[in-house]
Image: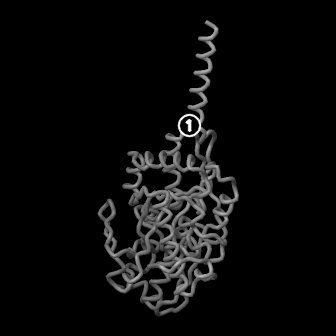
Amino acid sequence: MLRTLLISLFSFLFVSAGADAKQRYPKRPITTTVVWSAGGGTDAANRVIMAEMSKELGVRINVTNMTGGISGSIGMSSTLRKRPDGYNLVGLASSNVSAAVNGGWGEKFEVWYPFIVGSSPDVISVKMDSPYHSLAELIAAAKSAPGSFSAGAGGLGSNHHLHLLELSKIADIDISFIPYPGSAPSQTAVITGEVDFVITSMAEQSQLIRGNKLRPLAMLHPEAFEMHDGKKIPSAFVDFPELSKHLPISQAIGFAVNNQASAEVKSQLASAFKKAMASPVLKDWARQNYYELSGVYGEAAQQEFARLESLFAWSLEALNASKVSPETLNIPRPN
């Protein structure tokens, strides 16, 4: 009888230990540090995806914002310094790939193991009482007063910034660029008259457009855009077909874990991410906010960010807008 009890006890302990070993991560709350300001696209996407992933992982995921530095370098550096145990994630976007060439830090983007939630096309907008009702009118005014117009966007070297640089070059206009710690403050800046126009994503501007705070002039995308209420926004490529040579520069919004994290951590995050991406909550949020969902993660996402890093770095170099040569960072030229 005693022998039977001992065998049963050892069997129970063995099974319990095995089950616990399979669920070693996560055991406590996770923190996701978004490197852009609250209210922007990266912030919004992370809050939605983390809420859904929390249900799958069985722990709370706290989302916080840490702006500053160059191209999100402070938030990325802070996260990278922490133990690669999966309890500290970073919320980022394609705009962060230019941190190294802009002098923000000395790391290539390969230090991350990324998860891409989705993207949204860029749009040029002015405040509602602006005298400009089309991109052609805005460009004509900028040409007549060189250096007197300013544009805002989130981050030096962001995809929004690159769109502005390319448009300025092709339209032959001199525009002062004002970088902000995120898209939300740059949009507030145009509404208050701090800048003349703003370039951010449709997802970030949509509520302000619907609320008659912003007037969209043109999409920095080859195709015109139709909002849910039927409002149509023309493509900037109609007036400036030369934009198609280098644009559009794709956006990629999501999060990442330190690439040195264990296979178990990456696997658990991937499993939760895939389930979260398939959730009706996320799909409805994407449809309402003009996001095209991705779901790419791991090595495939690393390849995508490496492609964007190469494109951003060498585009900035060609436009004389980078501080560090991508060649010195061993960033290959885009194919």
Q: Position of residue 275 (x, y in %)?
A: 43, 45
The image quarter containing residue 96 is: bottom right
Residue 257 lies, in percent from the top left, at 58, 55
Q: Between 302 and 274, which is closer to the camera in this rendering?
A: 302
Residue 133's image quarter? bottom left
Looking at the image, is 195 positioned above or below residue 60? Answer: below
Task: Classify the position of the N terminus by image quarter.
Answer: top right
Residue located beneath label 1 in the image: 22
Residues 15 and 154: in front is 15
Lateral position of residue 78 relative to residue 172, left or right: right
Residue 175: x, y in percent? 52, 85
Graded by Cα atoms within 10 Å as few (under 14), some (14 to 19) or many (20 or more), the crowding at tag 1 reads: few
Q: Position of residue 200 (x, y in %)?
A: 48, 70
Picture layout, residue 229 above or below residue 136: above
285 versus 100 height, above or below: above
> In the displayed structure, would residue 261 be above or below residue 326?
above
Residue drawn at 39 percent across, 85 percent down? 137
Q: In the visual, does 12 lie left or right of 144?
A: right
Task: Name the residue: 49% across, 74% down.
Answer: 160
